[in-house]
Amino acid sequence: MSLVRTSGHQLAHGAYTEKQQATSNVLKHSNIDAVEIAPLMNDWLQHALAGAYGASARHRFMIGAMAGSRAAAFASGMAIVHARRGFLTDAYVCDEARAAVDAYERVLAVAPPLEALIVWSFADLPPALAARRTYFLSGLEWLARCGFALLNRLIRQRRLIMDRATFMRLIAFLNADICQSRRNIIPGWCPEDDTRVRLVVVSCVNVVDFARGHPKHQLELAPLLTACFVETSKKEMVSTASDRFYKYPIHQHFLYCLLTHIGCCVPDAELPQVRLQFGEACRSIRPMHHNWGFETAEAGGSAGSWYGIHSSVVAPPD
């Protein structure tokens, strides 16, 4: 796969040119000192990826930029830009946002952040710095499916060039492991609109550190999972009615996931009204009917994720 290589100003602020270079060439020609940049990268990632505020705030910023389907993305030029803009906005009222901005600016003072991220990811590092990198990469791995949305964007805008074999491998993985599996299975569970079926839905909404005292504390990031056992039907699952979050437990589960994804607390009392207005009214909560696999590939069905939230669905035995 190829990566864009541009000037420092362009990389820092998300602009691209048609000049393309492979990752190996970025590493070969970059003047960044990996050992020098690693502590700065660690500080930036601690605030923007692993910290409780930054981890959820980034998702809100991506939704605000109308990039909700890849809300969990981090390692892309536009994800970095959206995060920076969001942290700048929050910095006036939030110390954690100010710290994230300061950490970003320290990286930017030394090197373009996207280029620094590439070098930091692949370069040889001393054991202590490499261990810290492993900690952050363990979190990025759980969010990696957002890379498919990134792939689509880059291909559409001709910002990446890749050989046909690489492209076909990525598309095959996406179709087989995410979308096609749903088309093959879920419609068989719910053959008619009103057929009731019991499902277990497990969703990954974020990544968090292991608790203090755990052997992997500060060594790996773990997925933050939510799960629900629900009886539902195709009619409920594909509903786009405005009251679906009040009527159907399957939608209540995903609303809870979304609120957790963006760092909101769900009160004990029932919410009289839920409105999320990020960027544009009427795009508050994206419908889920494309996520279940009831539509064919030709119809454009089966999105890989919903607001960057990846879910597994199981029909338990009777």
Image (cartoon, helix red, strand yellow):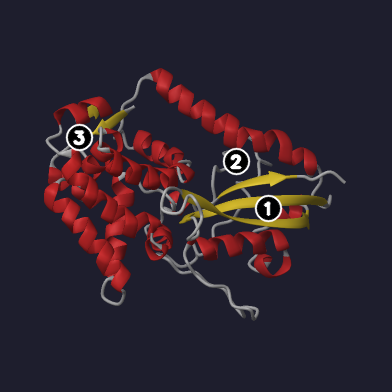
Task: Please give left or right for residue 265 compared with residue 198 in the image.
Answer: left
Mark 2 nearby-residue class (10 Å; few <14, some 14–19, many ≥20) = some
Element carrying mark 1? loop
Q: CA distance from mark 1 to mark 3?
A: 42 Å
Looking at the picture, how far across and down is residue 168, in whole percent? 46, 22
Q: Which residue is mark 2?
A: 301
Residue 156 in the image, given as x and y percentages of width and height: 37, 36
Residue type, numbered disc 2: Gly
The kind of residue tagged 3 is Arg
Q: Is residue 314 visible?
A: yes
To which residue does mark 1 refer? 238
In this orientation, which residue lies closer to the viewer: 41 or 197? 41
Query: What residue is rendered at 72% in x and 36% in y?
Result: 185
Q: Mark 1: which amino acid?
A: Val
Could you say whether the residue bearing mark 2 is in a helix, strand or loop?
loop
**Residue 88 showing in the rendered view:** no
On screen, 93 above or below 179? below
> Which residue has dot 3 on it?
5
Instruction: Find residue 82 and report its image quarter.
Output: bottom left
Residue at 54 percent of width and 57 percent of height: 286
Mark closest to the chain's N terminus, 3 or 2: 3
Q: Residue, x 68% and y 46% (percent of image)?
A: 313
Question: Which is more N-terminal, label 3 or label 1?
Answer: 3
**Badge 2 or badge 1: first in the primary sequence:** 1
Q: Quadrant of residue 19?
A: top left
